[in-house]
Image (cartoon, helix red, strand yellow):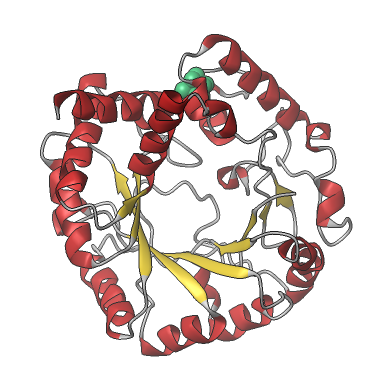
Amino acid sequence: MPSYVVMQPTTLCNLDCSYCYLPLRADDRRMSPAVARAVAADVNRWAGQQRFSVVWHGGEPMAAGREQLARLMAPFAPGVEHHMQTNATLIDDAWCDFFREQQVRVSVSVDGPEQDNQARRDRGGHGRYQIIMKGIEALRRNGLTFAALCVVSDPGPGVATRLYEFFLELGCDVLGINIEEREGVNTRENRHDAGAVRAFWSELTAAWRIAPRIHVREIEWTLRYVAAVLDGTTSDLLPRQLDPIPTIGYDGSVVLLSPELAGFNDGRYGDFSSGNVLTTPLADLLLAPQRTRWVAEFVEGVEACRATCPYFGFCGGGHAANRYFEHGRFDGTETEHCHNSKINLLEGVLEHVSRA
Ligand code: SF4
């Protein structure tokens, strides 16, 4: 059983960030309530057995509007936790009331202070930093806690400290840092000097240790792994089976493992979908994920990682979309994403610890 599903209420985004991977972000293709009802039929049962989240992700989910989102959330039982990943540009007091009423936990995408937000632009090429900050200010004014997600395109010296100080001031309680990935329609190079990436993560760990008031996702993963190595309990860390992480597209199609593959189509793998909730219950689509050809190929890649990569215990085999968009297939192993966000993350945190 999965622990969360990702729902795409609309493909539309009101921004046009230069590193965005979404192919349909200029189109407003909306999810119907029938899709939400079909997903909720299984999710409500799973949420009765364990903690379960629905992550609303777009496009920009708020571009679907409050009425539409309320219709899509209505079929889910009260115990289901709702999360929304948003670019924050549309947040105002009315949206904050909506988040409170629907008990939505918000995560905002912002890349640090203005100088680090050059990629976050609208279709006219205008930077949107001030509007993003206005949205975040509305969350703060309304007393809503929020997480933040930050993309780093150039992990040079001094960046990590500047970012951490910014996010401390911003007031988020959880922070995720993604080094820009080559995925989807974003074909920008993501190769960086290994020493620079290690130094970035080491510097971030040093900044965090001075004021550890934010849960920094990558640092916590790493420290949990290091503690497990020292305790001899690493076998408890990796899930026994891959979490299928189903992404439900606007039209009800289901893409497993990597939301970044939704909306793509290629001659070898087709549209990457494992079926559609409008014709087959979600639980049935998850019964044998390897029936989907590319998923079976990805599992071979994970086994190749297990056999060859000394970082497997930390990483668990990486993400399907990184392999596909970097290698053109799923059964390879190391990617640039591995270097940036797994191998040199672990090495960078250890580098800090060994110096501390
Ligand atoms: S770091 Fe890369 S090569 Fe190593 S286990 Fe992870 S995905 Fe596989």
Q: Residue sitting at 52 percent across and 68 percent down?
A: 61
Q: Residue sitting at 48 percent across and 42 percent down?
A: 185
In the displayed structure, would residue 89 be above or below residue 183?
below
Where does the image place residue 43, in percent across and percent down from the top left?
A: 75, 63
Exactly how many numbered labels are in the figure? 0
In the displayed structure, would residue 300 be above or below residue 119?
above
Where does the image place residue 343, in percent across and percent down from the top left?
A: 38, 23
Direction left: furthest residue: 158
Task: Confirm whether residue 334 shows in the render.
Answer: no
Q: Residue sitting at 38 percent across and 35 percent down?
A: 222
Horizontally, is 258 left or right of 169 in the view?
Answer: right
Q: Residue sitting at 57 percent across and 69 percent down?
A: 82
Horizontally, is 312 left or right of 89 in the view?
Answer: right
Task: Confirm whether residue 304 shows in the render.
Answer: yes
In the displayed structure, would residue 129 be above or below residue 151?
below
Along the viewing direction, whichever of 72 and 265 lies nearer the viewer: 72
Where does the image place residue 148, in percent across and percent down from the top left?
A: 35, 59
Direction front: furthest residue: 231
Horizontally, is 227 left or right of 6 in the view?
Answer: left
Horizontally, is 323 left or right of 95 in the view?
Answer: right
Tell me which corner region of the image, top left, top right, bottom left or bottom right, holds residue 290.
top right
Image quarter (top left, top right, bottom left or bottom right) of the C terminus? top left
Where does the image place residue 41, in percent across and percent down from the top left?
A: 82, 67
